[in-house]
Image (tube, rainbow, N blue to C red):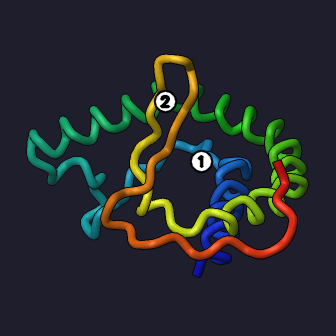
Amino acid sequence: MRQSIPMATILALMLAVTPLQAQDDAAPDLPTEEGRSADEGLSLMERGARMFLDGMRREMEPALRDLGDMLATMGPAMQDFLREMGPAMSELLGRIDDISVYEAPELLPNGDIIIRRKPDAGPLAPPQEGEIDI
């Protein structure tokens, strides 16, 4: 279970950096069976909502295009980063038993950060025998 969490995180990050595909063409008016456009039979609220959403789409189109370009340029670098850091992140997450048994990090007055174990978390596993790295 713990091994699948890092892999799912890495997969989600890799999918997030893939380029976005945008639709460049405006949606055509859809003809109805009588040959009228689809807007003719809509109520005033429906036409207003359609106009609002079309305006939002036109306003957001340049920003989404720029975002897609940025992700296209960042994608290879992010994939290289994940390829290099993936094993290290897996090892780090393997060392943490369960995040839900710890309290939120606390900043002490001297600048130290302490993460306390919750009182109802149960006992810790006994430490392994051998050398201790400091």
Please report the residue visible at 57 percent of the width from the left and 75 percent of the height from the top.
125
Up-down: is 65 above or below 86?
Answer: above
- Which secondary structure, mark 2? helix
Please report the residue visible at 85 percent of the width from the left and 47 percent of the height from the top.
81
- Outermost bottom residue: 1
Up-down: is 74 above or below 89?
Answer: above
Q: CA distance from mark 1 to mark 2?
A: 12 Å
Please report the residue visible at 57 percent of the width from the left and 27 percent of the height from the top.
112
**Closest to the observer, 79 or 101:** 101
Q: Earlier in the sequence, mark 1 or mark 2?
A: 1
Residue 23 disc label: 1
**Does 104 sit left or right of 63 as displayed?**
left
The local crowd at label 2, few if under 14, some if 14 to 19, many if 20 or more residues have their Cα within 10 Å, is: few
Residue 100 placement (x, y as % from top left)? 42, 62
Residue 70 disc label: none
**Does 100 sit left or right of 133 as displayed?**
left
Mark 1 is on which residue type? Gln
Up-down: is 120 above or below 24?
Answer: below
Q: Quadrant of the N terminus?
A: bottom right
**Does 58 sit left or right of 40 as displayed?**
right
- In terms of image quadrants, where is residue 48? top left
Task: Name the residue beneath numbered marker 2.
Answer: 60
